[in-house]
Image (tube, grey):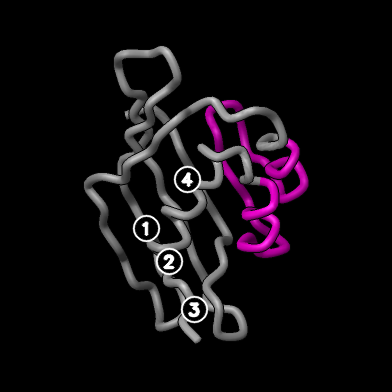
């Protein structure tokens, strides 16, 4: 059985955010001690799930300028630009993002994510 890699999970995360199913997805993919750093400050796991409980802000997302930094065989850093399209908005919103994934019992799980304006 194929276990998704970090980039597959990262794209799936944005797909879930756009679809309004981020809470279920993130609940599965985040580590217990996960942290998400947004413009208004850091969020712990429960706060992240609460943050994504509302209706989606965007209708599409594309990951650009992707880069992978392998820290060890079991830890990678992903950096990229997320090009987000909001409903009714002509101009896309761009976010610079970094995520850290760790291998846990054979599955990649997200332990950290940061996003902010370019």
Q: In which quarter of the image is the C terminus?
A: top left
The answer to whether the residue labelled 1 contacts the one labelled 2, judged by CB atoms less than 8 Å apart, is yes
Query: Is residue 50 shown above or below 1?
Result: above
Give the spatial CA distance, label 4 vs label 1.
Answer: 14 Å
Residues in magenta, as a range:
23-50
First in sequence, mark 4 or 3: give its number: 3
Judged by depth in the image, the label closer to the viewer, 4 or 1, is: 4
Judging by the rendered image, the residue that carries numbered circle 2 is: 6
Judged by depth in the image, the label closer to the viewer, 1 or 2, is: 2
Of all residues, the one furthest to the left in this rendering is: 65
Q: What percent of the width, then of the height, locates residue 44? A: 71, 47
Question: Dot 1: few (<14), some (14–19), or many (≥20) neighbours within 10 Å?
Answer: some
Could you tell whether 81 is left or right of 73 in the image?
A: left
The answer to whether the residue labelled 4 contacts the one labelled 2, judged by CB atoms less than 8 Å apart, is no
The answer to whether the residue labelled 4 contacts the one labelled 1, judged by CB atoms less than 8 Å apart, is no
Judging by the rendered image, the residue that carries numbered circle 3 is: 3
First in sequence, mark 4 or 2: give its number: 2
Q: Which mark is residue 98?
A: none
SS at circle 2 = helix
Could you tell whether 93 is left or right of 40 in the image?
A: left
First in sequence, mark 1 or 2: give its number: 2
Give the spatial CA distance, label 4 vs label 2.
Answer: 13 Å
Which of the pair 48/44 is nearer the observer? 48
Judging by the rendered image, the residue that carries numbered circle 4 is: 14
SS at circle 3 = loop
SS at circle 4 = helix
């Amino acid at each position: 059985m194929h276990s998704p890699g970090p980039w597959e999970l990262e794209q799936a995360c944005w797909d879930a955010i756009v679809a309004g199913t981020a809470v279920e997805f993130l609940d599965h993919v985040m580590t217990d001690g996960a942290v998400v750093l947004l413009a208004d400050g850091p969020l712990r796991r429960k706060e992240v799930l609460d943050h994504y409980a509302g209706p989606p802000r965007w209708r599409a997302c594309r990951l650009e300028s992707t880069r992978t930094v392998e820290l060890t065989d079991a830890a990678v850093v992903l950096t990229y630009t997320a090009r987000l399209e909001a409903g009714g908005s002509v101009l896309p919103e761009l976010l610079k993002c970094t995520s850290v994934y760790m291998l846990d019992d054979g599955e990649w799980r997200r332990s950290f994510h940061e996003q902010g304006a370019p």
